[in-house]
Amino acid sequence: MNIGQAKQIDLVDYLASLGYNPAKITREEYWYLSPLREERTASFKVDRRLNVWYDHGLGKGGNLVDFGTLYHNCPVKDLLKRLHSNLSFHQPPAPALVPAESLVKIISERNLVSLSLLRYIKQRRVAEEVAKKYCREITFSLHEKKYSAIGFKNNEGGFELRNQWFKGSSSPKAITSFENGSKELSVFEGFFNFLSHQTIQQNQFLPVSNYLVLNSASFFEKSKALMEQYDGIRLFLDRDKTGQNCTSQALSWGKKFQDESHLYKGYNDFNEWMQQIGKSQKKGLRQL
């Protein structure tokens, strides 16, 4: 896929494939809670007729390529690799179409057995037994075609979906929590970061913790009341601008919030660190 083809992908369809649905629609203007930052009032606008977006909070906008590089925090060439798959996103539609609903439809789920998905898990340096414990193999449809992905279930029954070429979710989008009877909570932004933590921890006899996987940074502030129920909250959030803003905000809430992202300093998140150097160092870790 080249840049010209990427710019032709329908932004509304693409946002839906990522799990974002409009808060309101006025003619050809689709308004969202920004996928690029945390907010309570929808100020991210897509003009579906022109197939462009504008985030009023950031003061930035553009085409799908501009959005994709910001959202995935990657260069254009990496974004094109993400888009270059068998997923046939719609071209910009004619005006006055029926409001779009989530395009991802779950067809079935089962234990993880697909060799291609297990290879992808291995590439991400997550232990197979950990992935099988927390994830499912999902068959879903998108644009009337079927695909398979690793599925991580949230508290409302929706799934975060990943395979080598696809990053998205099904509705409803929500947090995922695991209750183990602990007074301590460990918080992660994405589920592969959580799986990386569990991979390191599986052979270590460490104190039990409860876990919260946000599945989107937009759920961080909304989860404040849940987090504050615990005596200690350990934050393993991304080290990008959004993640660090959330961490700084939490540290201002009280001393029981602790920033643990120093573990993977120099990397965007826990799993990126695992993929690069974690394998050679994880045997020496004793403080996770």
Image (spheres, helix red, strand yellow):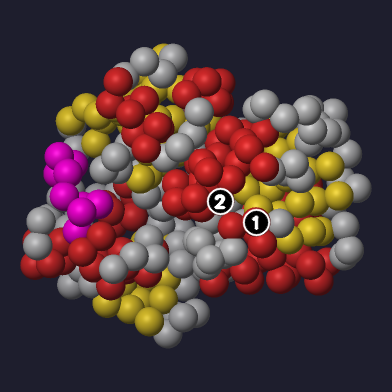
Above or below for 181 versus 245: above
Contact between labelled residues 2 and 1, with CB atoms less than 8 Å apart? yes
Q: Residue at x 45, y 37 (%)?
A: 125
Q: Name which quarter of the figure residue 259 lies in.
A: bottom right
Q: Is residue 190 left or right of residue 258?
A: left
User: Quadrant of the image for the N terminus?
Assistant: bottom left
Q: CA distance from mark 1 to mark 2?
A: 8 Å
Q: Is residue 169 left or right of residue 63?
A: right
Tell me the magenta residue range: 80-88
Percent across and percent down for residue 118 are 36, 25
| Residue farthest bottom in this picture | 59
Q: Which residue is mark 2?
A: 270
User: Quadrant of the image for the C terminus?
Assistant: top right
Q: Earlier in the sequence, mark 1 or mark 2?
A: 1
Q: Which residue is mark 1?
A: 263
Q: Is residue 226 magenta?
A: no
Amino acid marked by disc 1: Leu
Amino acid marked by disc 2: Phe
